Image (cartoon, rainbow, N blue to C red):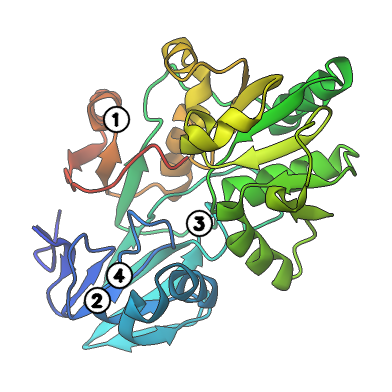
Amino acid sequence: MNNNWLIKKKEGLYCIPGDFYIDPIYPVNSALITHSHTDHARPGNKKILGTSDTINIMELRYGNNYCQYSQKIECGKLLKIRGVNIKFIPAGHILGSSQIYLEYKGEIVVVSGDYKRRKDITCDSFEVSKCHTFITEATFGLPIFSHPNDIHETSKLIKSISENSDYCHLIGVYALGKCQRFITLLRKLGFDDVIYLHGALMKISNYYIDRKIDLGELRNISELKTSDYSNKLVLCPPSSLSDRWSQRFRKVIKGFVSGWMGIKQRIKQKNIQLPIVISDHADWNEILTTIEEISPEKVLVTHGREEGLLSYLKQKKVTCNALNLIGFEDEDD
């Protein structure tokens, strides 16, 4: 990094003059949170700063332990902390997700958090912000990753429901972001039937509904008093596809919505009959396009497939390094 004011510590990325961390992995005195996925938004920090949706969802998930003091910030609003100018900018990852713009003594760094470039009506779209140093994730930072069209992937489920009406379709989706985005894609394609949810998906889905995001008719699967689940669509956390809870579904087609469903080995590993490749992260070309649009002097890579991306950027004579931050999972896609 050209500067000495943003450094890596065991707790995570630390801003020295501002005396705060970004998405720390251990509790700290002061933290800026990019988004509310649990690998970026951990409980127990004393003070946190984030968008309203990020902080609300953290409170919803963790209860009173989410922090001691919180401050909400609107995207685009400039805030100064100990001489560091700070701005939260939409990242397009999930509801409330943000990049964090930092400016200190004329030098600008943008920490992207997790981001995607596809249209998603459940969150604000990624905004390109010029900077000297851009810090990017690389969850899908290899040339083999090229995410297909979301609508085409979603239509595979509708087609399967139509052709296998005597089966229950049990589909794994992550509770925050993926679940709600996938429902809006189904609704866009005209799927108006009741969608049944595992209880673990209800709380956050209801929050999205409270935020005026139309998810159509949803019901908790526990409300369905029957042992016949034929022709029903049930969404559940990915872990529930293979646990005891799923054994109630006798005649079932199991699906999984994830960017990782483009990898045959993972499909086989998880025993998935209906892989649906939809990601909430940028793919290889989208990462490269983003870097090109921002045109920073330096690129730092936080987590994911760092080696492939760094190798490519070095060939293109882009100044870059790995930050090697630990504690960020790439499964929650």
Find residue 91 and name its label.
3
Q: Nearer the viewer, residue 89 or 166?
A: 166
Q: State the separation of the CA atoms marked 2 and 1.
A: 29 Å
Q: x and y percent of residue 10 in the render?
A: 8, 58
Disc 1 crowd, CA 10 A, few/some/many (<14, 14-19, 20+): some
Q: What element carries label 1?
A: loop
Left or right placement of residue 320 versus residue 223 in this view: left
Q: Which amino acid does label 1 sit on?
A: Arg
* In front of the other: 191 or 286: 191
- Sequence-wise, the earlier of marks 2 and 1 is 2
Mark 4 vs 1, N-terminal side: 4
Residue at mark 3 to residue at mark 1: CA–CA distance: 19 Å
Q: Tag 2, which secondary structure?
A: strand
* Amino acid carrying mark 2 in the image: Asn
Q: What element carries label 4?
A: loop
Quadrant of residue 112 within the rendered picture: bottom left
Residue at numbered disc 2 = 45
Please name the residue that numbered disc 1 is placed on: 305
Number of other residues with Cα within 10 Å of mark 4, as a class: few under 14, some 14 to 19, many 20 or more = many
- Indicate the secondary structure of the residue bearing disc 3: loop
Marks 2 & 4, CB-CB < 8 Å contact: yes
Residue 43's tag is: 4
**Alpha-carbon span between mark 2 and mark 3:** 23 Å
Q: Which amino acid does label 3 sit on?
A: Ala
Q: Position of residue 190 (x, y in %)?
A: 91, 39
At 43% across and 34% down in the image, what residue appears? 288
Left or right: residue 92 compared with residue 328: right
Q: How crowded is mark 3: few (under 14 residues within 10 Å), some or many (20 or more)?
A: many
User: Residue 300 in the image: x percent, y percent?
Assistant: 24, 46
The reply to whether residue 315 is visible in this rendering is: yes
